[in-house]
Image: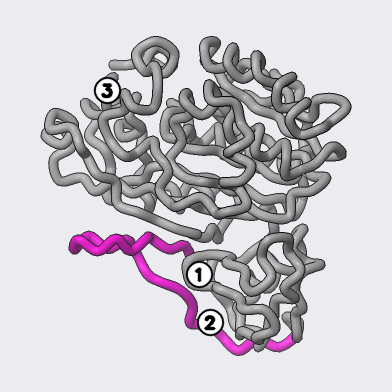
């Protein structure tokens, strides 16, 4: 039976010693699932090659409206996303990267000065901390101190995911956002596969069953999360595919907020419209995979969606008509459960 210590040692060894570049990966789990938006690609082009070569993420979990924000990156690795975030938060913002792998942190710390000068900042706005994402308190991260938490294909590597998400919602400010990409499964992973060093390192062995993820967030006081995008993971290595059997793996980008929400989508007759004012989003804004707001076009929304748009940093960019004084029952909203018939549809939350 693999202990928490053994699991961490296995992951550290895989990412610190076995993998030398992203080309050493055996699956598409730890690679970009979606094309990076053009504004982010322009920043990516400014980054040091060493930082990019050591990147093992599975998506592009970087939301908009970050200027002046404090952003925490869990499992920051070589610092790729942190340095992109450094540019987006600006000189008045702050980025904190947390990782447990010494070799990865050496790369990230080595390139702080390079990116500070590249972005024209007088002083660094990024810091990297060595530690465990299950124990952010030991790193000095206080309650209600962070505007946005991001993570890129790392939570699946944790041996105690409940503690990870509990820490996330502890450090987030009220109205703060969790925006992350990770690997999920369409069923629970057999115990022997959760302890396989290759499957664990390839972000498959520790993948959460999507319904267990929903239940976990519900117990932590987050009854509604949203899937922003999804893609089926290709198991390119025959040995890995043989071990995985019929398990379906998906790379999902998910957002959740530290808000008081309901566990079902309720209808209060509310309407939301996007003002077109977010930088690099003049024509539309995507909240999730079934809420695509076109600038100026009104959309009927449930009470939870209205709260996500009006009680967070997005409030200045949306108009909300109506309140929760009159209730009309359940709101017909969103896709259903994860499809297992070969379709790449993503699982949904309550909305």
Q: Secondary structure at mark 1?
A: loop
What mark, if any, has residue 198 been given in the picture?
3
Is 14 left or right of 46, judged from the image as shown? left
Q: Is residue 220 visible?
A: no
What mark, if any, has residue 351 been given in the picture?
1
Task: Please name whichever residue, 310 or 284, is drawn nearer the observer in this view of the structure.
Answer: 284
Task: Please name whichever residue, 202 or 174, is drawn nearer the observer in this view of the structure.
Answer: 202
What's the coloring here?
Answer: one colour
Q: Secondary structure at mark 2?
A: loop
The magenta region covers: 325-351
What mark, if any, has residue 64 been given in the picture?
none
Which residue corresponds to mark 2?
Answer: 331
Q: Position of residue 154 (x, y in %)?
A: 47, 32
Residue 261 found in image quarter? bottom right
SS assignment for the magenta stretch, majority: loop
Q: Secondary structure at mark 3?
A: helix
Query: Mark 2 against mark 3, which lies toward the viewer?
Result: 3
Is 13 left or right of 295, judged from the image as shown? left
Q: Dots 1 and 2: beta carbons under 8 Å? A: yes
């Amino acid at each position: 039976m693999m202990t928490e210590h053994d699991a961490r040692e296995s992951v550290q060894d895989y990412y610190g010693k076995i993998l030398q570049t992203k080309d050493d990966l055996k699956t598409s789990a730890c690679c970009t699932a979606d094309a990076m938006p053009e504004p982010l690609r322009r920043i990516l082009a400014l980054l040091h090659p060493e930082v990019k070569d050591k990147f093992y993420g599975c998506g592009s979990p970087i939301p908009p409206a970050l200027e002046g924000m404090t952003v925490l990156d869990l499992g920051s690795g070589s610092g790729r996303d942190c340095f992109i975030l450094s540019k987006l938060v600006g000189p008045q913002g702050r980025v904190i990267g947390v990782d447990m792998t010494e070799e990865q942190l050496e790369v990230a710390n080595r390139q702080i000065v390079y990116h500070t000068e590249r972005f024209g900042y007088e002083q660094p706005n990024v810091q990297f901390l060595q530690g465990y994402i299950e124990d952010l308190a030991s790193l000095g991260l206080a309650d209600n101190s962070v505007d946005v938490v991001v993570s890129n294909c790392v939570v699946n590597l944790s041996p105690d995911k409940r503690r990870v998400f509990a820490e996330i919602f502890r450090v987030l400010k009220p109205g703060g956002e969790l925006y992350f990409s990770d690997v999920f499964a369409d069923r629970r992973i057999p115990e022997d596969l959760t302890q396989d060093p290759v499957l664990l390192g390839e972000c498959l062995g520790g993948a959460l069953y999507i319904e267990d993820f929903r239940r976990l967030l519900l117990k932590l006081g987050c009854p509604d999360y949203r899937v922003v995008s999804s893609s089926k993971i290709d198991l390119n290595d025959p040995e890995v595919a043989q071990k995985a059997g019929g398990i379906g793996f998906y790379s999902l980008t998910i957002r959740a907020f530290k808000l008081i929400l309901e566990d079902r989508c309720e209808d209060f007759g509310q309407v939301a419209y996007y003002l077109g004012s977010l930088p690099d989003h003049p024509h539309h804004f995507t909240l999730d995979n079934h809420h695509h707001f076109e600038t100026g076009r009104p959309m009927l929304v449930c009470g939870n969606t209205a709260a996500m748009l009006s009680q967070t940093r997005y409030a200045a960019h949306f108009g909300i008509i109506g309140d929760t004084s009159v209730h009309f029952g359940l709101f017909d909203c969103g896709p259903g459960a994860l499809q297992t018939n070969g379709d790449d549809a993503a699982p949904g939350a309550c909305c």
